Structure formats: structure tokens, C-alpha cells
Image (cartoon, rainbow, N blue to C red):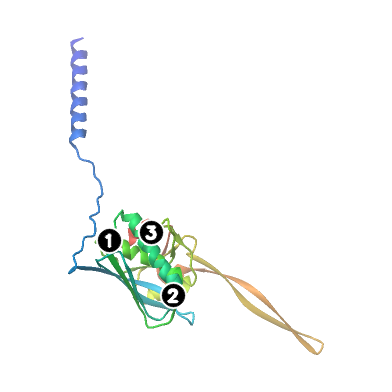
Amino acid sequence: MQDLKLFIAAIVVIAIVFLFTQAQTPRVQTIYQPLVLTPENVSMVFLKIPAVDNRGRGVSTTLFVEAKAGSGKLLVDVNQLLFWIDTQYSIQLAKKVAEQYTKADLSKIDLAYRIETNASLIEGPSAGAALSIATIALVLHKQLNTSVMITGTINPDGSIGPVGGIVEKAKAAKEAGAVLFLVPEGQSIQTTYKPVQKCQKVGSWTVCTTEYKKETTTVSDIGIEVKEVRNVEEALKYFLV
């Protein structure tokens, strides 16, 4: 009986010690410092992004995003870029996604976006994911992994949408020195239909028909690692250092 009382007392003591320890142990919580800038202070990040030029070739461009104290303006300096309106919309959306992800108030921060390239680009919204990631990194005071490149549109909820020219962009990413290429979900394997013309003699006439041959390309066969990402949160795991 005495042993039972001692056993119960020991259990009670252990329980009290455990509860006290839990109460004293602080919970780990990720807190992002807000982006605070003075008129003299400027913060900047850069990111290589793949694109397709007006000849259908993959090229590498450089995106710069700069933040300085201001009134929440968006400044854009992009040369030789087609689909200008689509790109402007992607930049506006990138800012909104960055605000949602970081919970930061950018109403007193001016953001300047600059894309440098030597080619005439056919881009539009396909740089949206890269624009969002660069903006988020800037707000979080984080550097970006320069060995990673990404393509994809950006949606208001932070999800990444499909784009064209995946194979050409993968080649450009490899040539630019990237070792990992991030693509939208479902686009690591590309299916194309190439026209094949067949002709035959029918009397004095030559009759030609065009058939379309299905070809499937695994993007990683180009010689670069390829991963699919569904949203900016997944992509940031590879970008933030």
C-alpha cells in the first residue's frame, strides 16, 4: 500500500514538472521584419529569368527589383519587351502577392522593376512567378539562389499558371548556368504536334495532305534538373538562401 502511494505521488510530481516546463518553453514563431527604408536607403535584388524572343529562341534576361521610401508607386523600366500591358499587370499582381505572403504594408514603399535584355522578348504574363518571388525576397531581406530559374504566370492566390516555350526556356536557363529550372505543375513533360506533309500522284495531279505527328519531350532531357511547383510558397523553398 505504501509503495502504491509513493508511485502515485511520483506520477503527480512528474506531471507538475512537465506542465511547468511546457508553460515556460517559448513557442517558435516565424516573424518577418517589416521593410523599413529611409530616403537615403535603397534595397535591391536581382534574378535571372528565361524568356522567348520574337524568333522563338530561348534567351536569358535579368530582372532587378529595387525598393525605396515613397508612396507605394510602381516604377517600370523594360526595354525591348512585347505585350507591355500584360507585363504591367503581372508586376501589379506580383506586388499584391508579395503583400499577402509577407503580411507587409508596402503603401510607403516605391518598387522599381527593371528587365535588361538584348533581344525583343515575347513575354507578357509568363514572368509573373519570377516577379513575385523577387518582390517577396526583397521584402524579406533575403538573397536569391542564382542557380535556380523559373517560368510561370502568377495568379492572385499565389498559384503559378502554365506558360508556353518551356523547352526553349529550359535551354536558355541551362546556357545561363542554372542547375534547377522550376516550371508550372504539369509542364515538366511537353507534348507537341509537328506537321508532316505526305504527297502522292493521282493521275496527272499531285495530292498532298498534312498530318500531325505527336511528339513528347521530357524537359529534363535537355540537361537541367526540372521540378514542378504549384505556387510561390513551393518555389521559394528553392530560391531563398
- First in sequence: mark 2 vs mark 1: 2
Q: Nearer the viewer, residue 146 or 121?
A: 121
Q: Nearer the viewer, residue 46 or 201?
A: 46
Q: Amino acid at mark 3?
A: Val
Q: Amino acid at mark 2?
A: Trp
Q: CA distance from mark 3 to mark 1?
A: 14 Å
Query: Would you say the residues marked 2 and 1 are in contact, meaning their CB atoms lie under 8 Å apart?
Result: no
Q: CA distance from mark 2 to mark 1?
A: 25 Å
Tell me the SS state at disc 3: helix
Vertical placement of residue 207 versus 114, above or below? below
Nearest to viewer (mark 3 / mark 1): 1
- The x and y percentages for residue 115 are 35, 75
Q: Residues within 10 Å of mark 1 (few under 14, many from 20)?
A: many
Which of the 4 image quarters holds residue 114?
bottom left
Which of the 4 image quarters holds residue 191?
bottom right
- The x and y percentages for residue 133 are 34, 63
Query: Would you say the residues marked 3 and 1 are in contact, meaning their CB atoms lie under 8 Å apart?
Result: no
Tell me the SS state at disc 1: helix
* Label drawn at residue 236: none
Vertical placement of residue 149 versus 233, above or below? below
Q: Quadrant of the N terminus?
A: top left
**Left or right of 37, for residue 158:** right
Residue on which the image places disc 3: 232
Residue positioned 42% across, 67% down in the render: 89
Residue on which the image places disc 2: 84
Q: Amino acid at mark 1?
A: Val
Residue reaching furthest front?
Answer: 71
